């Protein structure tokens, strides 16, 4: 497990670069800004589904925070297998590598995990330090000011079965409600691979199509248009984007995640219509991109309907 965690940490900088070209806004029929999993994630189109889909790579350990046994992790180096760019700026859609068809990685702790293994959360202003880390994901030209945003931390259960601390920047008006959603997901042992702030490095990264960051605010306009995404207001969150990809026509984001378009898969971390994740976001008035008709955005939850 130490070796796998070290490999994960070594690839973290490249993985942070995951969504460079995905920070574009979207309506129901436009590409969304997938701030956590776009350009540097798994393997898209043509993905094979000949692997078992009912495996349990995300089964969690006991609520004490200790995993039940040593898990088997995915043997894939994240954030380093750069894809050729297509004319639209994304990476080439590639089949999902065998190593990612049942995806499981340990979480690298960027923030201290909850010491007692229980759910913890904080809601506060976007401080100068947080603002600096956000980099170009926010600017004064964005449609929401820093005073109307909140820096939120929540506990989440990793695919390593351990409790971790994640961070999001959200619309301050939605922060309490969103925290309540993640509290329920934590208590239900719903696994999340990582939850960190997108940065300038993400926006500038070459596409690798294997990212899986759960994230909220990325302030960019819709590609080729002037309208803002719900992410630009802090009113959308993408959850486990590699396991819950975006698809429209031949486009799949992350570009290596095509195997996960098979929604009969029941691996932990995958979101299905009517399940706990969808119900919890619906409880606070947010809708799910997996229910859209002109495209499918299985990772995307939004307070605006787009």
Image (cartoon, rainbow, N blue to C red):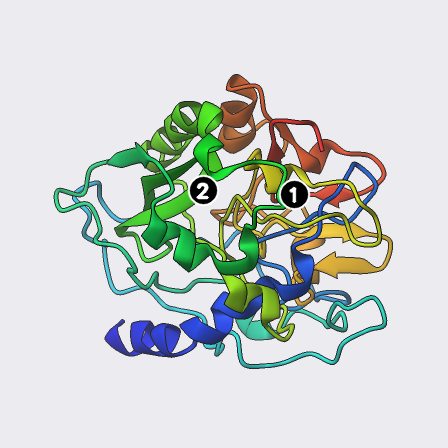
Q: Quick one: SS at disc 2?
A: strand
Left or right, 196 with reference to 279: left
The mark that comes first in sequence, 2 or 1, is 2
Coordinates of residue 202 in the picture (x, y in percent): 55, 65
Vertical position of residue 55 compared to residue 46: above or below: above
- Please tell me which residue lies in front, 174 or 60: 174
Residue at point 45%, 70% (across, down)? 74
- In this view, the residue in front, 100 or 12, is 12
Q: Left or right: where does residue 273 sit relative to residue 193?
A: right
If the image is split into quadrants, where does the N terminus sit?
A: bottom left
Q: Residue at x 83, y 41 (%)?
A: 29
Residue count near mark 1 (Cα–Cα under 10 Å), binned few <14, some 14–19, many ≥20: many
Q: Name the residue under label 1.
A: 298
Residue drawn at x 35%, y 36% is 125
Which numbered dot is residue 93? none
The residue wearing badge 2 is 169
Where residue 21 appears, as percent x and y from the top left, is 68, 63
- Residue 214 x %, y %: 49, 49
Q: Residues within 10 Å of mark 2 (few under 14, many from 20)?
A: many
Task: From the viewer's side, name the closer residue of 180 and 162.
Answer: 180
In this rendering, does residue 75 appear at all? yes
Proximity of marks 2 and 1: CB atoms separated by less than 8 Å = no
Residue drawn at (83%, 48%) of the image: 225
Residue located farthest toward the left when viewing the structure as drawn: 116
């Amino acid at each position: 497990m130490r070796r796998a965690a070290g490999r994960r940490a070594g690839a973290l900088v490249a993985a942070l670069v995951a969504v460079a070209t995905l920070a574009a806004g979207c309506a129901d029929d436009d590409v969304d800004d997938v701030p956590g999993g776009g350009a540097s994630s798994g393997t898209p189109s043509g993905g094979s589904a000949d692997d078992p889909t009912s495996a349990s790579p995300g089964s969690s350990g006991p609520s004490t925070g200790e995993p039940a046994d040593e898990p088997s992790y995915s043997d894939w180096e994240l954030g380093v297998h750069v894809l050729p760019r297509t004319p639209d700026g994304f990476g080439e859609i590639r089949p999902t590598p065998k190593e990612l068809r049942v995806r499981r990685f340990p979480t690298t702790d960027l923030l201290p995990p909850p010491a007692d293994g229980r759910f913890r959360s904080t809601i506060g202003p976007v401080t100068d330090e947080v603002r600096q880390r956000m980099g170009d994901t926010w600017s004064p030209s964005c449609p929401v000011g820093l005073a109307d945003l909140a820096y939120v931390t929540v506990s989440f259960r990793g695919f390593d079965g351990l409790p971790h601390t994640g961070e999001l920047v959200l619309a301050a008006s939605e922060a309490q409600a969103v925290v309540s959603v993640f509290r329920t997901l934590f208590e239900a042992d719903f696994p999340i691979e990582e939850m960190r702030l997108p940065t300038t490095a993400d926006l500038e990264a070459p596409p690798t199509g294997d990212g899986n960051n759960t994230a909220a605010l990325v302030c960019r306009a819709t590609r080729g248009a002037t309208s803002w995404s719900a992410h630009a207001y802090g009113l959308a969150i993408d959850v486990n984007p590699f396991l819950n990809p975006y698809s429209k026509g031949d486009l799949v984001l992350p570009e290596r995640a095509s195997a996960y378009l098979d929604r009969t898969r029941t691996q932990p971390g995958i979101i299905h219509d009517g399940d706990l994740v969808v119900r919890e976001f619906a409880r606070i008035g947010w809708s799910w991109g997996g229910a859209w008709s002109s495209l499918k955005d299985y990772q995307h939850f939004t307070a605006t309907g787009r």
